Amino acid sequence: MRCPECGIDDDKVVDSRPTPDGAAIRRRRQCRACGTRFTTFERVELPELLVRKRSGVVIPFSRQKVLDGMARAAKGRVAQEELERAAARVEQQLRVGGAREVPSEQVGVKVLAQLHELDDVAYVRFASVYKDFQGPEDFEEALLTLRKDAPPKAPDPA
């Protein structure tokens, strides 16, 4: 690793630890020539994940695109950090099994599952676009599904 200060590639690792999400190793290094300390990260380079759209077009998977869609659905309801973790879980779930190409429908189903765990309103908002709701009956059906999954309410302590 080249020192950002002097450009020499002779350094020693002073400290090494995993990042909080476990996806990388953070290393503190010190240049042997000038003494400058700097941080590097090591990550596993995964093969590109591809998404096959309904039209047949194949595009690279974008966690940012998933996050943007989830953020629009959850606007003002879910913290950004929670959405970022959920988007990371979507990608992780899609990569299980080693498939290099996944259908866009599978991406949508994984996003819906994550939103269902985070916030019911965000789930319905995303579902209304993803499932192309055409009328109130589509919303009623989605809400009925949510009610079936919800735990029973505790009785009023009156």
Image (cartoon, rainbow, N blue to C red):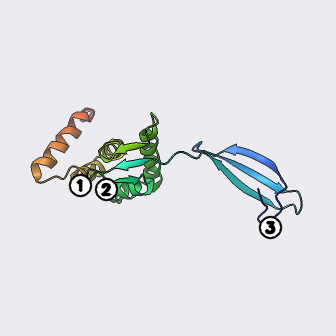
Judge by depth and name the residue closer to the eye, 52 or 146.
Answer: 52
The residue carrying mark 1 is: 129
Helix, strand or loop status at disc 3: loop
Q: Residues within 10 Å of mark 2 (few under 14, many from 20)?
A: many
Residue at x 12% of width, y 54% of height? 134
**Which residue type does callout 2 highlight?**
Ala
Q: Residue at point 82% right, 55% down?
A: 30
Place of residue 14 in the rendered image (x, y in percent of width and height, measured from the top left) = 81, 49
Task: Give coordinates of residue 130: x percent, y percent.
Answer: 25, 51
Residue 6 located left or right of residue 63? right
Q: Residue at x 85, y 55 (%)?
A: 10
x and y, in percent, of residue 23 in the image: 58, 44
Cα separation, mark 2 vs mark 3, equals: 44 Å
Q: Quadrant of residue 5?
A: bottom right
Residue 20 appears at what percent x and percent y? 60, 45
What secondary structure is marked by label 2? helix
Q: Is residue 92 left or right of residue 54?
A: right
Measure the alpha-carbon separation of dots 1 and 3. 50 Å
Give the label on residue 5, or none.
3
From the viewer's perspective, tell me whether residue 35 is left or right of residue 83.
right
Q: Residue furthest right?
A: 33
